[in-house]
Image (cartoon, helix red, strand yellow):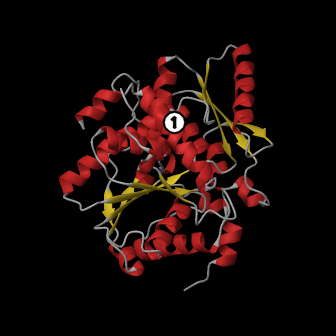
Amino acid sequence: MNIINKLLAPFPRISLAHLPTPIDESANLSAALNGPPIYIKRDDCTGLALGGNKARQLEYYLGEARENDADAVLITGAVQSNYARMTAAAARKLGMECHIQLEERVPGVDDTYRRSGNVLLDRIFGASFHSYPEGEDEAGADRQLERIADQLRERGKNPYVIHLGPDRSPLGALGYVRAAGEILSQIEDQGLPIDHMVIASGSSYSHSGLLVGLRAAGSRLPVSGICVRRRAGLQQIRVKDCTRAVEAMLRLTRPVVTEDDIHVFDGTLAPGYGRINPMVLEAIRLLGQTEGILADPVYSGKSVAGLIALIRAGQFAESKAILFIHTGGAPALFAYETELMRQLTVQ
């Protein structure tokens, strides 16, 4: 889309993802749910370090990092952070050190959670580990990152910090502004009857970037964000603030996203971030057994569960077709091996 390319032109970007990712029709899943046709935007297939939506965001963060001649990248996230795993891979690809700060966001985890999945991949990529004891203190986690960055500067390094707090510039959201143009082109080229989109909503960067990109391109397609970290009331504010920050970065003359554009659903969130519930377990099993596609308990599984809940509630009764944005996260499945093996039954 020309307007999106023009808006994004001032921002340095490096190519990390395999783009465009395909849109697959998921007829078996649609039939199993007796709902409207479902299509899946396969951002689990972005290529970098087993794929995921964060590859799109990192193209802008590391574009800026390389422009600033950074030789080390710092990021904070949960122990099983997909973002940290992909950052470590991208940093190595660009010849940079990677420092990962692991936050204690999920209570009651076992040793498998702390060693397998994304943590194992982080170690393969040679990341340096740091710890932060809190899981819901974004400002504190970002401040601790800056202290680590200062220590690196004292050693002569030139670090680049990827902050995740809502008070920081959401540069990574530009990856989904760009994705909006990609999706609209695919819908037009393939003649897809999409009239609604569903995406996981956590940091809100992907959700907010997608909304801004769609509206800037003139599309009124609605987007439902499935809450994966915080309740709907808080997430609504988070998405609104992030869209305003993205609009400001793009120097739009007026807001293009209205409050009526922001839809979030938290009916599959409990008991909280990174925790499995029966709806998430069903979603993981159903997507795997109907389409052969993997979803993780933290993001994609929880958002598929939200999609299923909304379909069963009649939310999309009048829809011609739904596009689900698959944000990846499959490596985290192995971190939840103990719980999943206990709950899954052999058919």
Vertical comparison of 152 with 326: above or below? above
Residue displayed at 49% across by 75% down: 286
**Residue 344 x, y percent position in the rendering:** 62, 78
Q: Quadrant of residue 292?
A: bottom left
Residue farthest toward the bottom in the current orientation of the protein: 347
Q: Which residue is mark 1?
A: 90
Judge by depth and name the residue closer to the eye, 28 or 243: 243
**Residue 163 x, y percent position in the rendering:** 62, 32
Q: Is residue 17 visible?
A: no
Residue displayed at 58% across by 61% down: 266
Vertical comparison of 209 with 314: above or below? above
Please state the total of marks drawn on the protein image: 1
Residue displayed at 55% across by 75% down: 282
Q: Is residue 249 left or right of residue 213?
A: right
Q: Quadrant of residue 124?
A: top right
**Residue 149 x, y percent position in the rendering:** 69, 23
On-image quarter of the N terminus:
top left
Judge by depth and name the residue closer to the eye, 168 or 163: 168
**Residue 92 x, y percent position in the rendering:** 55, 33
Q: Is residue 60 visible?
A: yes
Q: Label 1 sits on what residue type?
A: Ala
Q: Assess disc 1: are there few (<14), some (14-19) or many (≥20) residues with their C-alpha within 10 Å of its C-alpha.
A: many
Q: Secondary structure at mark 1?
A: helix
